[in-house]
């Protein structure tokens, strides 16, 4: 603290570029969105002030509520899919085993592959006629379980979420592995002397020591799921019948396809406040449970 107070100006000068970029690309667009949200504007003609008209329209818009419901489904599927699976594999790969580094690389690979490529490949695998999944089911005599995975509203969102879980498990796997390697080995050695089994060591040492990392992973997972757009857009474009439409896609459609910049800005504000509220709530719940 004393060192920081002595070097105040170099610290301010060093942080200034990042702060200016943050203000330009984060704070100012939010303020502009507030301005557009009370306007009716198609991007060409003159803006017209309509007050809270866009907000009222959004609250009575059934597609908005459907998109919100779909977003919540994605959040729940991601948190309860990506985080536990990544934690399980991280615990497994943290042991000394042959090919551990190879498995880590394979696990992380989907994270660095383009989302568009992943969407196209999984879209082909889900194909109702020539897709891998239906062919596998037919191959083992389970023809009655074959589905139109992306064309049936009952299965479309589940299919998309499975792809999303597969894509991002590797990210949390690497985060958890890094946290596991920072746990002091002395704790495990002391527990071993006391006769604690592998499961008890995981329960009473590993998981408590990883508490903060797990909380951060859950928050990252929630915020990432709320911003999901490209994967669903390529795989289903929100269909069939808005069954996979999420808020970001609906905002994009209203803003750029329907050229309703005012209404699109209102939807973006709903996403902003909804994300903020959900992340705050989840942080509060997780921290209270861990205390």
Image (spheres, rainbow, N blue to C red):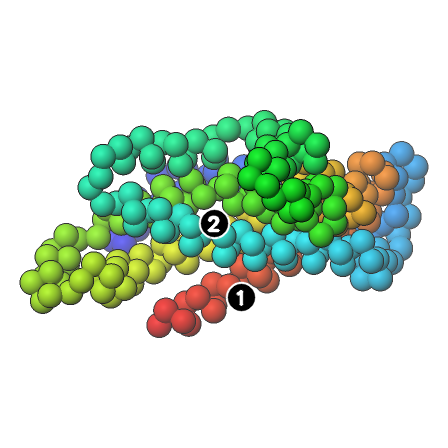
Question: Which residue appears at 88% of the width and 48% of the height?
Answer: 40
**In the picture, residue 274 is in which quadrant?**
bottom right
Residue 105 is marked as none
Camera-nearest residue between 263 and 89:
89
Camera-nearest residue between 69 and 35:
69
Is residue 202 visible in the rendered image? The answer is yes
Camera-nearest residue between 188 and 130:
130
Q: Quadrant of the N terminus?
A: bottom left
Q: Are marks 1 and 2 in contact (CB under 8 Å)?
A: no
Camera-nearest residue between 252 and 173:
173
- Percent x, y of residue 162: 56, 45
Q: Is residue 281 above or below residue 228?
A: below
Say left or right for 172 vs 147: left
The extreme left residue here reads: 193
- Percent x, y of residue 263: 82, 49
Say left or right for 11 vs 234: left
Q: Secondary structure at mark 2?
A: helix
Say left or right for 195 vs 17: left
Say left or right for 1 vs 285: left
Label 1 and label 2: CA atoms lie apart by 20 Å
Question: Which residue appears at 85% of the width and 49% of the height?
Answer: 39
Residue to which mark 2 is pinned: 82
Q: Upstream in the sequence, badge 1 or badge 2?
A: 2
Q: Secondary structure at mark 1?
A: helix
Neighbour tally class for label 1: few under 14, some 14-19, many 20 plus, Cα within 10 Å: few
- Percent x, y of residue 54: 84, 55
Question: Which residue appears at 31% of the width and 30% of the height?
Answer: 102
Residue to which mark 1 is pinned: 281
């Amino acid at each position: 603290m004393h060192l920081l107070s002595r070097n105040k100006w170099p610290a301010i000068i060093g942080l200034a570029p990042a702060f200016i970029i943050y203000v330009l690309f984060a704070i100012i667009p939010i303020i502009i969105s507030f301005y557009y949200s009370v306007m009716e504007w198609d991007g060409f003609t003159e803006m017209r002030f309509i007050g809270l008209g866009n907000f009222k329209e959004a609250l009575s818009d059934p597609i908005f509520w459907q998109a919100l419901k779909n977003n919540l489904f994605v959040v729940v599927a991601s948190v309860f899919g990506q985080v536990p699976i990544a934690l399980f594999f991280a615990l497994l790969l943290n042991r000394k085993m042959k090919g551990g580094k190879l498995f880590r690389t394979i696990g992380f690979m989907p994270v660095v592959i383009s989302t568009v490529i992943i969407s196209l490949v999984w879209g082909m695998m889900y194909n109702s006629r020539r897709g891998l999944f239906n062919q596998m089911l037919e191959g083992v005599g389970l023809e009655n379980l074959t589905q139109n995975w992306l064309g049936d509203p009952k299965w479309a969102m589940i299919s998309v979420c499975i792809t999303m879980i597969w894509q991002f498990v590797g990210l949390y796997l690497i985060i958890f592995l890094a946290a596991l390697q920072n746990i002091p080995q002395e704790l495990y050695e002391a527990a071993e002397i006391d006769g604690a089994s592998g499961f008890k060591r995981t329960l009473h040492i590993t998981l408590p020591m990883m508490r903060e990392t797990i909380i951060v992973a859950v928050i990252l997972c929630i915020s990432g799921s709320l911003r999901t757009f490209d994967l669903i857009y390529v795989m289903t474009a929100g269909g069939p019948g808005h069954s996979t439409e999420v808020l970001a896609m609906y905002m994009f459609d209203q803003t750029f396809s329907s050229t309703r910049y005012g209404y699109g800005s209102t939807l973006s504000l709903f996403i902003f406040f909804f994300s903020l509220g959900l992340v705050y709530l989840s942080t509060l719940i997780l921290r209270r449970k861990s205390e």
